[in-house]
Image: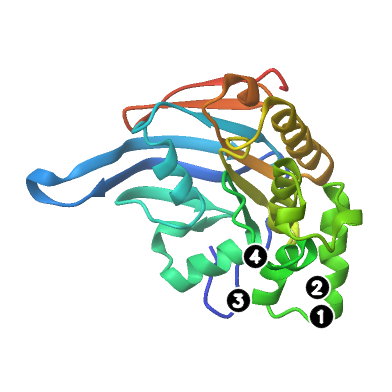
Amino acid sequence: MAKANAANPPPPTPELHSPIIRLRGVTKTYGSGPTAFQALKGVDLDIERGDFVAVMGPSGSGKSTTMNILGCLDVPSAGSFLFRDHHVETLDRDQRALLRRKYLGFVFQGFNLLSRTTALENVELPLLYRGEDKATRYRLGMAALDKVGLKPWWDHTPAELSGGQQQRVAIARAIVTSPDVLLADEPTGNLDSERSVEIMELLTDLNRNSGITVLMVTHEPDMAAFARTIVHFKDGLVERIEKGKAA
């Protein structure tokens, strides 16, 4: 089995409808001794390539810790995390950063846009970090804005956009590198119900038409209903998995 290294991220895996993510016996403990807290207590979870997964559960259930591990932002205390046939728990910080940059996109509740830059410049940021030239950044950035329906607003700053439009820019930024997996943390949390539905329809379209695997944390059953699979966490474990209405 090939391993990632700082100069050569792992190549994409060609199989479709096979697990792109597999967790086995994953635990996560913070602290040590009598004050130690076990956030995850042995999570087993498969995420199939091309699925749209909603992750739900009360505060402290382990869903956010799991998403941090799936996003290669943290590592398990024990257990295995297989992503694209590579054991992420064995990778160092730099190798995990390469996986994030090449294969993962992130969408946050708070948009996290740079206030003084245009929509296009915000979308281009991941490409800038990757060392792409100006022409490539422009071409890919405009294509990503087109996918989310904001190409005509490419030169607008966040203050000139609605909340829903700002989240669309954030989604365009997340997909501009053509990631395998899009991780969305409460992507509709700051939006009204109408804008929330629009964002969920956009994520559904990206999942179906672009083949991006979507993992979304949400507290809202109405938003989770857009997913094909719903994973419920409780007390640091997967409580149950059910099919969403979109399945």
Mark 4: amino acid:
Lys
Q: CA distance from mark 4 to mark 3?
A: 11 Å
Specify whether residue 3 is in view.
no
Identify the residue at horizontal 29%, vertical 51% (top origin). Answer: 77
Mark 1: amino acid:
Lys
Judging by the rendered image, the residue that carries numbered circle 2 is: 137
- Residue at disc 2, secondary structure: helix
> Which label's residue is closer to the chain start, 2 or 3?
3
Q: Report whether 136 appears left or right of 71.
A: right
Mark 3: amino acid:
Asn
Mark 2 touching mark 1, by CB under 8 A? yes
Judging by the rendered image, the residue that carries numbered circle 1 is: 134
Mark 2: amino acid:
Arg
Q: CA distance from mark 2 to mark 1?
A: 5 Å
Mark 4 touching mark 2, by CB under 8 A? no
Residue 123: horizontal and vertical position, in percent? Answer: 74, 62
